[in-house]
């Protein structure tokens, strides 16, 4: 740190002042975790509808949008409370700067949530004929436009891609944080969405066909396998820079986040992989739900570690 006095103003100017600890903390962890669920259930639902008849998963048409709606609102709420001036969030919509990835991401996420809300209303209105009574105009309009749900699905899958990945792009703009610069971070967002989405849908799959539940377990096992492989690639074979090596020292043996990192890898990736593979063979619903629960917990722990450790490294 260097200090000098300005003769004209007698002000003390400080250079290379360290940032006050972790700026993006657990609030952003929950933000990313919830977004993974919100977009992930759509990805997995689209895959399952492509593979199976809707009758094999009768409750997914209305429950998938409900899960996504809740998760996306959690994501947006934690985004809002992380801001120092949350009331100024409205400026993103009233005075947008389209060169900002935050602006683009906020608009895309809001559009995604808006359409998902319509899908939720349509799905609930179709699933429960008595919902709203005979005089409710909202449910009547929803039932009259029931086909909108299926028509908008391809667009929603396309829209979910940037909504899922734009957080990695924002993190990559912090050019001083070497660990966030890798293209692998974008793919980790996708694997996280598939992990979280399949895990969330497992909890509503009790009445589904055995074949549909097997495919759900397959998505979970593939997602945890490749996500774990990418984490291990970073952990053992990171030759990007000395700064990346210094950052990863926090999760290596003796590091401050070593225990949390390996707890996340064990709970969220290794154990769920073998549990999901076992559930694929014997269709054990309890085992599959346990795998889903561990995957969600482990994913949150892993995201928390990967978010915080680059911020622990001094910039000067």
Image (cartoon, helix red, strand yellow):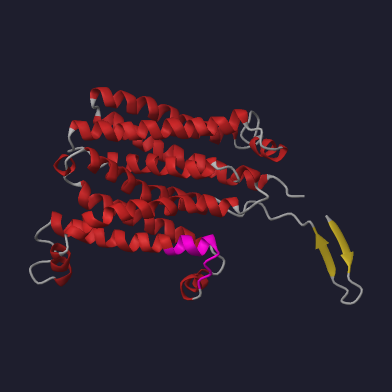
Determine whether, in the image, residue 133 is placed left or right of residue 71: left
Q: Quadrant of residue 58?
A: top left
The quarter in which the N terminus is drawn is bottom right
Image coords of residue 258 (percent x, y): 59, 33
> Is 152 or 307 nearer to us in this picture?
152
Determine whether, in the image, residue 272 is placed left or right of residue 81: left
Determine whether, in the image, residue 104 is placed left or right of residue 17: left
Q: Is residue 103 magenta?
A: yes
Q: Quadrant of residue 241?
A: top right
Determine whether, in the image, residue 247 is placed left or right of residue 156: right
Q: Residue at x 25, y 58 (%)?
A: 119
Q: Quadrant of residue 197?
A: top left
Q: Is residue 243 visible?
A: yes
Q: Identify whether 132 is placed above or below 276.
A: below
Q: Residue at x 38, y 31 (%)?
A: 222
Question: Which residues make up the magenta segment?
Answer: 96-107
Q: Identify whether 83 is placed above or below 35.
A: below
Q: Is residue 30 magenta?
A: no
Q: Is residue 26 visible?
A: no
Q: Residue at x 57, y 66 (%)?
A: 84
Task: Tally the numbered discs.
Answer: 0
Q: Residue at x 62, y 42 (%)?
A: 179
Q: Identify whether 70 is placed above or below 91.
A: above
> Is 214 or 184 nearer to us in this picture?
184
Image coords of residue 182 (percent x, y): 58, 42
Image coords of residue 147 (percent x, y): 17, 58
Image coords of residue 181 (percent x, y): 60, 45
Identify the residue at the far right of this view. 7
């Amino acid at each position: 740190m260097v200090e000098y006095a300005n003769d004209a103003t007698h002000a003390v100017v400080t250079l290379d002042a360290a940032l006050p600890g972790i700026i993006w903390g657990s609030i952003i962890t929950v933000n990313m975790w919830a977004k993974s669920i919100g977009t992930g259930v759509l990805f997995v639902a689209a895959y399952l509808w492509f593979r199976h008849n809707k009758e094999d998963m009768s409750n997914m048409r209305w429950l998938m949008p409900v899960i996504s709606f809740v998760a996306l609102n959690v994501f947006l709420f934690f985004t809002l409370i992380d801001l120092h001036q949350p009331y100024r969030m409205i400026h993103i919509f009233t005075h947008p700067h389209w060169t900002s990835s935050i602006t683009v991401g906020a608009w895309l996420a809001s559009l995604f949530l808006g359409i998902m809300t319509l899908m939720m209303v349509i799905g609930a209105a179709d699933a429960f004929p008595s919902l709203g009574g005979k005089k409710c105009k909202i449910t009547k309009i929803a039932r009259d436009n029931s086909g909108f749900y299926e028509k908008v699905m391809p667009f929603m899958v396309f829209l979910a891609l940037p909504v899922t990945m734009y957080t990695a792009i924002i993190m990559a703009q912090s050019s001083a944080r070497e660990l966030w610069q890798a293209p692998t971070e974008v793919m980790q967002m996708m694997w996280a969405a598939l992990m979280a989405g399949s895990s969330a849908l497992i909890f509503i799959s009790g009445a589904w066909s055995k074949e549909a539940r097997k495919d759900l377990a397959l998505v979970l096992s593939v997602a945890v396998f490749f996500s774990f492989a990418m984490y291990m690639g970073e952990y053992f074979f990171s030759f990007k820079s000395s700064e990346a090596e210094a950052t990863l020292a926090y999760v290596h043996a003796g590091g401050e986040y070593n225990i949390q990192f390996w707890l996340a890898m064990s709970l969220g990736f290794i154990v769920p992989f073998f549990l999901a593979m076992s559930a694929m063979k014997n269709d054990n619903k309890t085992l599959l739900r346990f795998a889903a629960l561990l995957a969600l917990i482990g994913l949150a722990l892993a995201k928390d570690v990967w978010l915080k450790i680059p911020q622990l490294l001094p910039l000067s």
